[in-house]
Image: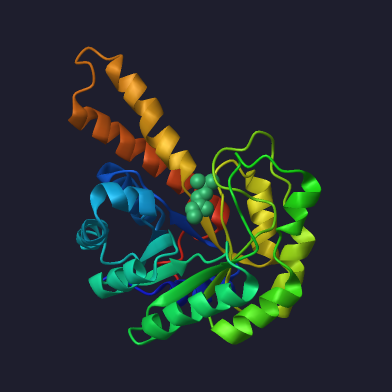
Amino acid sequence: MSLVTMSYLLKKAQKGHYAVGAFNFPDLSSIQGIAQAAAAKKSPVIIMPAVLTMNEMGDEMCYSTIETISHEYPDIDIAIHLDHCSDFERIKRCIDYGYTSVMIDASAYPFEENIERTCRVVEYASRYGVTVEAELGHIGGTEDDISVDERDALFTKVEDAVEFVKQTNVGALAIAVGTAHGFYKSTPKLDFDRIAAIRAAIDVPLVLHGGSGVPDEDFKKAIALGITKINVGTELKVHGNFDVQKAAYATADHGDVRKIQALVRAKTQEIVEHKIDVFGSAGKMVEA
Ligand code: 13P
């Protein structure tokens, strides 16, 4: 049995001063690649369907596929986490299917409403021991064309984080500190002082979204200052699939799908293993 709650993984990581990687996947082969990487590195891992993937594969199918794959890795702790969801009924259904962790993203709403919507999910999830992640501030996408001042205004404020955690009792908090979802047009500038200030003010594990394209040294610094979970998506979607498919179609058999899947698994494993090394979670499954 290797499924665990996200809180369990993150509390251990907080004590050990490393971060646990949370990976989105576009297909089954990618889930296998993520699990293989975690097993090869003896690292805990968070596997997280994004809503757009769930729309393709099905909410319950995503859960049961990961759960089935987890049987192959009884020694690896795996959390199955629903990424960014704003729909309470859908979150509830995912908890009922067995997801060990969920993210309620009500960050687009005013502060008080974000609290209300988050509390509703925490109340339901806590009955089943399921961890809840929420977002405060606005992380956004790299495609958002906004000025530096506008961007800074969307960053998570320390005093808001204190109040939010006090009122919601969330298990993890995604903070806006300079990263964004998707590929960056230029190197992202992380607000390290803000990470340190939020960490000093609250104990809840902090989450960095938008991991694709963040330099390794920035990850290490962010972890040293208090980040405990790091989300990576786009890099696996594009490098994990698109590039290898192009390579496969150039081969003699023009990309037998099974061969493409093998390439996707291998490429995904390679990317995830590297992240695990950078995040410092390698070998943590063999330590006491
Ligand atoms: P990237 O796609 O930019 O890696 O971000 C993933 C993420 O934060 C998912 O919540």
Q: Image height check: is 284 above or below 35?
A: below
> Foreground: 10 or 38?
10
Which quadrant would the C terminus be assigned to in this image? bottom left
Which quadrant would the N terminus be assigned to in this image? bottom left
> Foreground: 284 or 181?
181
Percent position (x, y) of residue 105?
50, 64
> Does any portion of residue 240 appear in the rendered image?
yes
> Does any portion of residue 45 appear in the rendered image?
no
> Foreground: 280 or 82?
82
Q: Image height check: is 38 above or below 16?
A: above
Residue 248 relative to residue 193: left or right: left
The residue depicted at 69 percent of the width and 38 percent of the height is: 187
Percent position (x, y) of residue 136?
62, 67
Percent position (x, y) of residue 22?
45, 57
Residue 70 relative to residue 152: left or right: left
The residue depicted at 38 percent of the width and 43 percent of the height is: 269
The residue depicted at 28 percent of the width and 18 percent of the height is: 249
The residue depicted at 33 percent of the width and 84 percent of the height is: 128
| Quarter location, residue 167 | bottom right
| Quarter location, residue 183 | top right
Percent position (x, y) of residue 171?
51, 77
Q: Image height check: is 184 above or below 179?
A: above
